[in-house]
Amino acid sequence: MDSLSLLELNALVRRSLEQCLPDEYWIQAELSDVRSNTTGHCYLEFIQKDPRNNSLVAKARGMIWNNIYRLLKPYFEEATGQLFVSGIKVLVKVTVQFHELYGYSLTVLDIDPTYTLGDMARRRREILLQLEEEGVLTLNKELEMPLLPQRIAVVSSATAAGYGDFCHQLKHNPGGFFFYTELFPALMQGNQVEESVLDALDRINARIDDFDVVVIIRGGGATSDLSGFDTYLLAAACAQFPLPIITGIGHERDDTVLDSVAHTRVKTPTAAAELLIHQVTEVAEHLEDLSARIQQGAYALLEQEQRRLVAIQTRIPVLVHRKLSEVRFSLLTVRKDLTQATLTLLSRHRHRLELLQQRIMDASPDKLLKRGYSITLKDGKAVTDASLLKTGDELVTRLSKGEVHSLVK
């Protein structure tokens, strides 16, 4: 029986594959174990998972030669805003290769970024739909922006050019308004974006009363590696954060999930600073307008009161003269009434005195004496009881005309 060596068998397989699959093929797959070496070649695996249980159903080794990879990678990342890394779905043009030593592999010749964009958009839609079903999608957007957002918690990389631009813009604002910023450092690229930003938000939340707004910014460099801002956990945390969140992640393509749930999305860190400056400027202008209106109102009121005082001043002499006339007339009336009352009172008392005088005259002893009566006095006092007299008492009897002196015996 004839036999083949392993090398001969593998060579037969290679020739057979080259004859059966000589063309180039577009395939859909997920990237796994993406790595490159010092030669500039990229080595990776293509995998396919069962959508029902996420188990692997297919796997193939792949590679991208240096001359293709140095063009394909920046083209893909610029078009999608996504790093060419494990975990993303791609549509690539490949040729089927088989090597006697290394076995079956796929060599990448081209890539279609629109497929990946579509998959990323689908994932974003799924996350947003889940947040909407949970009732938290628009919670942060519904928060009222503070009138004076001057205490700002910044989530960014300390070395990012965008952070420096943001702070410089605020510090040198045309109105000279004061802004307090505090940096909560976070990684803004790579596979730790989600964890790092969530940690920064937790630290801000622990001091929630110290700030008015949160600004999440990155800037400078390429617009790739935005997948970290398209995660459910980060979006849910930002949607339910108790302070308004402004994002300035610095890209032109469609919004990330984080942008979609934030209170306000701007394109760049500088635009985020301009937004805050504009908000404070509007309030300042409104306050100045109110101040001017109050001043004008005060001036108008003072002028009105001045005119009223002048009018009153011109009326004072007339009013005083009228009042004096009224008082003079009143005094004359009172004087007349007082005189009449006095005369009436005097007349009443004069009549009373006359009556009293008449009564006194009627009761006068002289009048009785003239009628024939007499008064006997002892020691100047009238004697009314004869039994009280004693022998030797001297008496004076007073008549109408004259007196008689007698002695009791």
Image (spheres, helix red, strand yellow):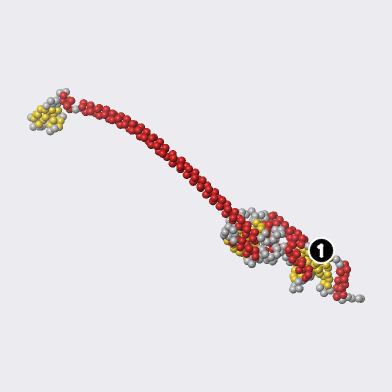
Q: Position of residue 375 (x, y in %)?
A: 14, 28
From where the camera sits, is residue 297 visible?
yes
Pick the residue in front: 105 or 275.
275
Q: Residue visible at 69% across and 61% down?
A: 251
Which amino acid does the dot numbered 1 rest on? Trp
Q: Residue at x 72, y 65 (%)?
A: 83
For mark 1, does the 10 Å Cα neighbourhood hold few (<14), some (14 to 19), or many (20 or more) residues?
some
Occupied quadrant, residue 403: top left
Residue linked to disc 1: 26
Where is residue 34? Give x, y as percent: 75, 68
Location of the C terminus (image quadrant): top left
Q: Is residue 317 left or right of residue 76?
A: left
Nearest the camera: 121 or 367? 121
Tell me the residue at 18%/25% (across/down): 367
Q: Is residue 139 visible?
A: no
User: Element at badge 1?
Assistant: strand
Answer with left or right where residue 119 lies relative to residue 136: right
Image quarter for residue 41?
bottom right
Residue 40 coordinates in the image, percent (x, y) = 76, 71
Percent position (x, y) of residue 241?
A: 63, 58
How many marks the image carries: the answer is: 1
Check the image and name the residue furthest to the right: 1
Q: Is residue 341 above or below residue 220?
A: above
| Above-or-below relation of 84 to 275 | below
Pick the quarter of the image with the N terminus: bottom right
Residue 150 sits in which quadrant?
bottom right
